[in-house]
Image (cartoon, rainbow, N blue to C red):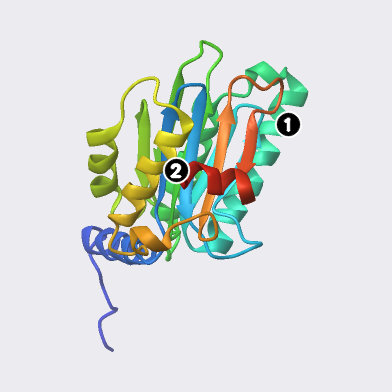
Amino acid sequence: MSAPFYVSPEQWYQDKAEYARKGIARGKPIVAMEYDVGIVLMAENRSATLRKISEIYDRIAFGGVGKLDEYENLRKAGVRYADMRGYSFSREDVAGKSLANEYSTVLGSVFTREMKSLEVEILVAEIRDDGKSAFYQIRYDGSMTDTTHYAAIGGDGDKLVDVIRGGWSAGVPLKDAARLGRRALAASGNSASLDDLDERTLEIAILDRRRQGRTFKRIIGEEARGLFSG
């Protein structure tokens, strides 16, 4: 009788992590940063219908990199969680941190218990009641990082953050923030060149704290073109 095949727990987790990282690296990264009256999120996306950046709730946006069906299912679950919490308590009780914790729990559970980890990296961006912004980055294994002012997810996330850090300043207007985000995305080895990143190939959305209720808005067409002109 042959001995059963054995893989050590360390090797099993290492293989799953490598598998997830490779899948995420094939996707297009997302950058997000504060501007003077809100948060702008940007990603290269040549599809007219499929979205990498979406609204979760009044003051919360979602970004996903990796396998579309997997992060889309997570987005829908986040919308259901936020709607239920807002209905059961109040809309003000729906917070980016609690949503990020839920994502962390789900991703960590899948990574630990399932044969295949999810090939996704998630970004939750929020305009808080105190006027400040928060960014929560949740990885395939459930690990979570919170940052202020700016964030990037995807295979070259650290490189993109370095580009943003070198050009960002408090109170930057939307036009300058969008140009900085475009320059950061062009620095990724998995993105198009700077000249090819424009209103036709970029997905752009904002959380505008001046808007009442739902602060999420997509920037498209002439409005997007105006960010990069002049």
Q: Secondary structure at mark 2?
A: loop
Which quarter of the image is occupied by the N terminus? bottom left
Q: Is residue 31 left or right of residue 205?
A: left
Are discs 2 and 1 less than 8 Å apart at CB?
A: no
Give the residue type that dot 1 points to.
Met
**Which residue: 54% across, 53% down?**
52
Disc 2 residue crowd, few under 14, some 14–19, many 20+, Cα 10 Å: few
Asked if 45 appears above or below 81 in the picture, the reply is below
Report the residue that reaches farthest toward the front.
230
Q: Return the residue found at the far bottom.
A: 1
Whether residue 24 can be seen here: no
Using the image as rendered, state which of residue 41 and residue 58 is in the foreground: 41
Q: Is residue 5 visible?
A: yes
Indicate the secondary structure of the residue bearing disc 1.
helix
Seen at 69% across and 28% down, the residue is: 214
Query: Furthest residue to the top?
Result: 130
What type is the residue that disc 2 sits on?
Gly
Quadrant hosting residue 151: top left
Q: Which residue is mark 1?
A: 84
What residue sits right under mark 2 in the picture?
A: 230
Check the image and report above or below for 84 versus 205: above
Which quarter of the figure has residue 116? bottom left
Residue 169 is marked as none
Please name the residue shown 35% across and 41% down the image. Answer: 180
Q: Is residue 136 left or right of residue 76?
A: left
Q: Earlier in the sequence, mark 2 or mark 1?
A: 1
| Residue appearing at x 77%, y 25% in the figure | 87
Query: Closer to us: mark 2 or mark 1?
Result: 2
How far across and down, in percent of the image, does residue 167 sit? 27, 34
